Image: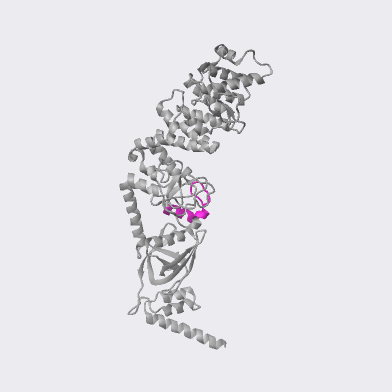
Amino acid sequence: MEIFLCAFCQRALWDPVTVSCGHTFCRRCLGGDLPSKCRLCGGKSVLLGSRTVACNVLLCDLLEKCLDKGTQVARLKTDLQELLRSRDYRAALRSVQKGVALAPDDLMLRLCRSEVYVALQQYQDALEDLEVLCRQKPEESEVFFRKGKVLLEMGKQSEALLQFQHCLTLNPNFHAAQYETEKILTNDASPLPGTVMELKSDASQNLKGSNSGKELTALVSFEGEPLQDLKGRKEVWLGEDASDHSQAALSIPEWLRKKSNSGFSAEKERDFEEGASAAEAKSTQEHKPDFADLLSTSDLECSLCIRMFFEPVTTPCGHTFCKECLERCLDHRPNCPLCKQSLREYLRAGKYNTTLLLEELMMAVFPLQLADRKRVHQAEMAELSNLTKNIPIFVCTMSFPGIVCPLHVFEPRYRLMMRRCQETGTKMFGMCMYENGKSFADYGCMLEIQKIAFLPDGRSLVDTIGKRRFQVLRRGHRDGYHTADIEYLDDEKASPDGPVWCWWLISILPLDLTRKLTIFSETSLKARLTQLKHILNVILESRDYNS
C-alpha cells in the first residue's frame, strides 16, 4: 500500500498529479498554485503548456482498482472537509458525489451533500437527499428542521411549518425549530390561532395524513449552535435566546464534526470529532492488498505500442506513454495522441522524466514481465548499434571523410534516426546522395554526430563530421527511414581513407555529383590523385584560354 501514499501528506493518493520531475502528489497537496519546485527533489515542478493542474489519468484508474471502498470514502471525506472549509462548493459537490456513489448508505455523506446543494441553491436536490435520510432515520429531529429550512428557501411556508412542528414533536426543546415556527406564524398575513406550544401539542394531529412522520432529521445536533447561512445572509443564533443574532456562524466542517446525538455508532462519531483523516489512516493500515491479484499487465500497457510501459512519461494533460512512443508522436504533431491538447511547451523543454511511481509499481508487482520488457529494448538497441548491418541512411547529399557536414533535421523519420543514434551511443549514421531508380547511391560516408541543438518545435541543428566511406550491399527500411548493409572501403597501402585535403578538394571542385561519386568510390589513392590532377589541369587550361 505504501506505493500509493502521497510523498507529502503520507496518505493515500487522491486526484494524483504527476509533475515534470516525475514525482506524484495529491492534487490538494500541491495547492491551488503549482509550486515552482518539487517538494521532494527540488526540481522544477511545472506542467508545461497546461492551464490547469490535470490529474494522472492512468494512476486514477489504478487507484480505483487497488484502494478498497473504505479507504476511498475516508479519503473523500478528508478532502471534503477542506473543500467546505474553503467554501469551494462546486468542487465539494463533485467530491461528495463520488462518495455517495461509492457508499450510498453513508448517511453523513448524504447530509453533507444536501448542505452543499443548499449552498449552490439547488434546493430540490437537497430535498431529495433529506427525504432519503428521513426514511432511514425516522426518530431523529434535526433533519426535519433542515428539511423545513430548505422548504422555506423554496417558498413553501406551510410545508415548512409542518416539518418544524414534527421536529418539535420529536424534540420539544429544539429551540431553532421554535424560533422558525414563531417567525412563520408572526409573518403570516393570516396567522394560525394559538401559541407555538399549542401547535406543538396538536402536531401529531396536523401530521397524521402526511409522510413526514417517517422522515429523518439531521444527523448532527444544531441545538446551542449557530446555523450557517450558506448564501451569506444574516446568521441566526440557535441558542437559548433565539432573538440573539449577533453570533458568527460555524463553517460546515465544524458542525459536521460536532458530536452527533442521532444514534450513530461511536466509530462514526469519532470520524467527525477527530476528522476523517483518522479513519483514512486506519483503513490504509488495515488494507494491504495483493496488487498482483488486482492488476494485470494490460493495466500497465502503453496505448500506442500496446506493450508494457518502458520509461513511462506523463504529459501535462495527464496521459501516460512510453517515452519513445511519445517522442515519435511528437515528431509528427505537437499534440497529445489521446486528447489532442497542445504539447508545444512540453516539446520545447525537450526533457521527459519518467513517472517514478509507475516504475516502482511495475517493479514491485510485475518484476519478471518488466525484466522481459527491458531485454526486448536492449535487444533493439543492440541491433541498432550494429555499424555494418541495417545502418540508418540519411539520403541528402555527398559527404567526405574528415569534412564537416552540418544538417538541419526536420523530417519526423530523421528526428527518430538522430535520437536512436544518440541512445545507442554510436552517434553514427550513413549519408548517401539520392540516385534515380535506387533510392540512394551505391556509395556513401559514415557521419559522426558531434553536437545537436534542439529547436523549440522539435527540429534540430546537427553538427557532423565524415568518418569512413562505405559501399552499399543491401537496401532496407526501418520505421520510415532507409537502412543498408554495408562494407567499408579502404585505400590500398595507405591510410583507410587517404589524406583529408584530398576529400576537401573533391568537395569544393565544380564537378557533377556523378563524377564526384566515381572519384569517391576509388580505393587507390594514386588513381584518385591522378584523376584530380587531370581535372585541375583542365580547369587551369580553361582559365588561361578564357583570359
In which quadrant will I find the N terminus?
Answer: top left
At 51% across and 78% down in the image, what residue appears? 510
On screen, residue 39 above or below 98:
below
Q: Give the range drawn in magenta.
A: 323-346
At 64% across and 13% down in the image, what residue appears? 193
Nearest to the observer: residue 413 or residue 210:
210
Q: To which quarter of the image does residue 149 belong?
A: top right
Report x, y in % for residue 305. Answer: 41, 49
Report x, y in % for residue 25. Answer: 44, 46
At 37% across and 49% down in the image, what residue appears? 359
Residue 334 among those drawn in magenta: yes
Nearest to the observer: residue 9 or residue 490:
9
Report x, y in % for residue 436. Answer: 47, 66
On screen, residue 31 above or below 185:
below
Q: To which quarter of the image does residue 192 belong?
A: top right
Q: Would residue 333 be seen by someone viewing this image from the given angle?
A: no
Q: Would residue 244 be seen by someone viewing this image from the given angle?
A: yes
